[in-house]
Amino acid sequence: MLAIDTINTALHSVTRPIPSPKAGEVLIKIHAAGVNRPDIMQRQGLYPPPEGTSAILGLEVAGVIVDLGDTSSHLNIGDKVCALVTGGGYAEYCTAARQLCLPIPTGLSFIQAAALPETYFTVWSNLFDRAQLKAKETVLIHGGSSGIGTTAIQLAKTFGAQVIITAGSNEKCQFCTELGADLAINYRSQDFVQAVKDYTNGNGVNVILDMLGGDYLPHNIKCLDYDGRLVHIALQKGIKADISLLPIMLKRLSITGSTLRARNTEFKAAIAQQLQKNVWPLLATGQIKPIIQQTFPLAAAEQAHALMESSQHIGKIILTV
């Protein structure tokens, strides 16, 4: 099969054997695969795959099941699915845990479905399970125009929260406002801490979803209301920050974070069940939708990475097979 492998931080087309599904797995003939920041980090040698998983990049795919690892599966050959995988998505075929395969929502294409797993699993797990975002609360989403951001905006609004986002251009801010954000802050031209304080009458927000880390941490703490929750899901601005512990104590703040890739199948399967129950019907009716900037053929994965690294995109970048 054709696959994209990393050689000295560059992407190259290679030929690899078609993988065989083990018990509890299925084999998917891939029609489309999502591109994500962890793929960039893995290519750069900064995010090695978990032990025992494919070294081929790619954490989410959509396609057709062509083989079953055992007969106990609830899935069938020919089923159209999207799946969260721990690697192997940049290829013509990929194995996936059957518990992490979800039916493609009615009306969505393979390309749209490939934009779902990584972002929707991540947002649901962190915004609703970990941060416990509730209706009528206010959430600040950094990187509002990213794949994670556009997903978080729609889900937070749909479940009754008020949404503030930051983004790096007026165009991105306008897009996020049109998508449902109540306030969009251009962090290049505005002080986002002051903008948040002004909008919330000095109170701050209840929840922050942060993919930046680094020196954003003390600013995030200033943005939080009493009993606020800050969730880190990435560290694009670095792993270290200098902060005062006093406001954390005085405002009873909770600071947490998570990574998804290394969690076991059972943990991810619980998220999959929640998504199928609470979110997949919204996708099927068009109430929410994946936002896709551009597609590239699999062989042009390097161009897809260059676009993501430029941060000029809005929403998801997809590879077609």
Image (cartoon, helix red, strand yellow):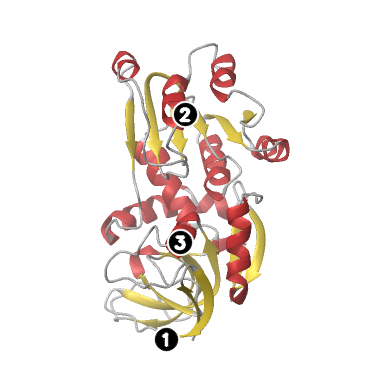
Asked if residue 302 is positioned above or below residue 158 in the image, the reply reads below
Q: CA distance from mark 3 to mark 1?
A: 25 Å
**Which of the two discs, 3 and 1, sits closer to the camera?**
3
Q: Secondary structure at mark 1?
A: loop
Q: CA distance from mark 2 to mark 1?
A: 46 Å
Q: Earlier in the sequence, mark 2 or mark 1?
A: 1
Residue 283 makes an appearance in the image: yes
Nearer the observer, 154 or 140: 140
In which quadrant is the C terminus drawn?
bottom right
Q: Can you tell which mark lies on residue 81?
A: none
Q: Position of residue 28 (x, y in %)?
A: 45, 77
Q: Amino acid at mark 1?
A: Ile
Q: Can you tell which mark lies on residue 135?
A: 2
Q: Amino acid at mark 3?
A: Gln
Q: Amino acid at mark 2?
A: Ala
Nearer the observer, 183 or 156: 183
Q: Earlier in the sequence, mark 3 or mark 1?
A: 1
Q: Can you tell which mark lies on residue 44?
A: 3
Q: Residues within 10 Å of mark 3 (few under 14, many from 20)?
A: some
Asked if residue 258 is positioned above or below residue 206 in the image, the reply reads below
Q: Position of residue 117 (x, y in %)?
A: 47, 58
Q: Is residue 237 left or right of residue 293?
A: left
Q: Can you tell which mark lies on residue 18?
A: 1
Q: Residues within 10 Å of mark 1 (few under 14, many from 20)?
A: some
**Which of the two discs, 2 and 1, sits closer to the camera?**
1
Q: Secondary structure at mark 3?
A: loop
Which residue sits furthest front?
8
Q: Position of residue 158 (x, y in %)?
A: 54, 38
> Where is residue 131, by image quadrant?
top left
Q: Secondary structure at mark 2?
A: loop
